[in-house]
Amino acid sequence: MDGVDESTLPEKSADGTYAYKNIEVKAGTLVLMHGNLMYTSEANRSMKSRIAYNFGVVEGEYDWLVDNYLQPYEGETEFEKLASLS
């Protein structure tokens, strides 16, 4: 995979599991994550909802992966394309 090598792999704990770092942000904060970032999110056990939006972007010359968890709506074959900036 482009951009991935030993230096970009996540740290592991002494027991061999991935060592995730917790971050907390204020409500309304925009958090951007690179597509190669390995992340996890614990279950929301509070009574307050946690709304998240996912915005996936793939450059025009690449195809969307068929095993990506985010897929077009049923009956659609592709996502809506953004307007060209050129």
Image (spheres, rainbow, N blue to C red):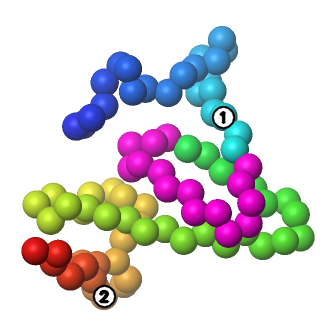
Residue extending farthest right: 47
The image shows residue 35 at horizontal and vertical percentages of: 39, 50
The segment highlighted magenta reads 24-38
Q: What's the residue type where badge 2 is placed? A: Gly
What residue sits 54% from the left and 22% below the top?
11
Classify residue 59 as left or right of residue 36. Answer: left
Classify residue 59 as left or right of residue 28. Answer: left
Q: Quadrant of the C terminus?
A: bottom left
- Magenta span dominant secondary structure: loop
Indicate whether 50 appears above or below 75: above
Q: What's the residue type where badge 1 is placed? A: Lys
Check disc 1 and report the residue beneath it.
21
Classify residue 84 as left or right of residue 76. Answer: left
The image shows residue 57 at horizontal and vertical percentages of: 31, 64
Q: Quadrant of the N terminus?
A: top left
Q: Secondary structure at mark 2?
A: loop
Residue 27 falls inside the magenta stretch: yes
Residue 60 falls inside the magenta stretch: no
Residue extending farthest top: 14
Check disc 2 and report the residue beneath it.
75
